[in-house]
Amino acid sequence: MRRLIAFDRDGKVPDTTVILPYDQRQKSRLLVTLENNEEAGVFLPRGTVLRGGDQLKTEQGFIVLVVSAPEKTSTAYSKEPLLLMKASYHLGNRHVALQLGECFVRYQHDHVLDEMVAAFGLEVRHEAVSFEPETGAYHSHGPKHHSHEH
């Protein structure tokens, strides 16, 4: 079994891919099946959150591209920033992972949250898309994110 132990930051062409939903991409220890049907173990520092596009490598240099799996989400749309802020505040107050974008906030599907957000005046659509939520100020990030330590 291959052991994926670090991020590849050299931009090498990946040998294969692994498709993972968000719930699995936030685990630092994980058994996965690669697209080439091999099993691999992910062994990363605790708190690491994988993003679509991250590349992991083994000690031998085998590279695996992480792909975010489409998953059932609720996306709340509004062109009014105050409504988006209000909905995001209340969702965050419930410790819901959120993906923020221009004119939308996205979260893993939950009909109770859908009703709450709709009551604020946002249009809620159910979509099967890649879910890439904000990881928070204190989480480890993949290679595309930087630290604010100086």
Image (cartoon, rainbow, N blue to C red):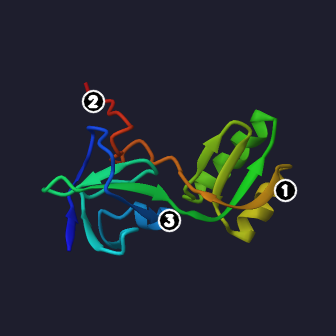
Quadrant of residue 70 in the image?
bottom right
- Choose the circle earlier in sequence order: 2 or 1: 1
- Choose the circle earlier in sequence order: 3 or 2: 3
Q: Are marks 1 and 3 in contact (CB under 8 Å)?
A: no
Q: Which quarter of the figure is the N terminus placed in? A: bottom left
Nearer to us of marks 1 and 3 is: 3
- Foreground of the two, 73 or 18: 18
Q: Are marks 3 and 2 in contact (CB under 8 Å)?
A: no
- Choose the circle earlier in sequence order: 1 or 3: 3
Which circle marks residue 21 in the picture?
Answer: 3
In this picture, is 35 found above or below 122?
Answer: below
Which residue type does callout 3 highlight? Pro
Disc 2 residue crowd, few under 14, some 14–19, many 20+, Cα 10 Å: few
Q: Tell me residue 72's x, y (percent).
A: 65, 67
- Foreground of the two, 87 or 75: 75
- Left or right position of 114 against 73: right
SS of the residue at dot 2? loop
Q: Which residue is mark 1?
A: 119
Which residue type does callout 2 highlight? Glu
Which circle marks residue 149 in the picture?
Answer: 2
Q: Label 3 vs label 2: CA separation?
A: 29 Å
SS of the residue at dot 3? loop
Nearer to us of marks 2 and 1 is: 2
Q: Tell me residue 119's x, y (percent).
A: 84, 56
Q: Tell me residue 56's x, y (percent).
A: 29, 53
- Foreground of the two, 20 or 18: 18
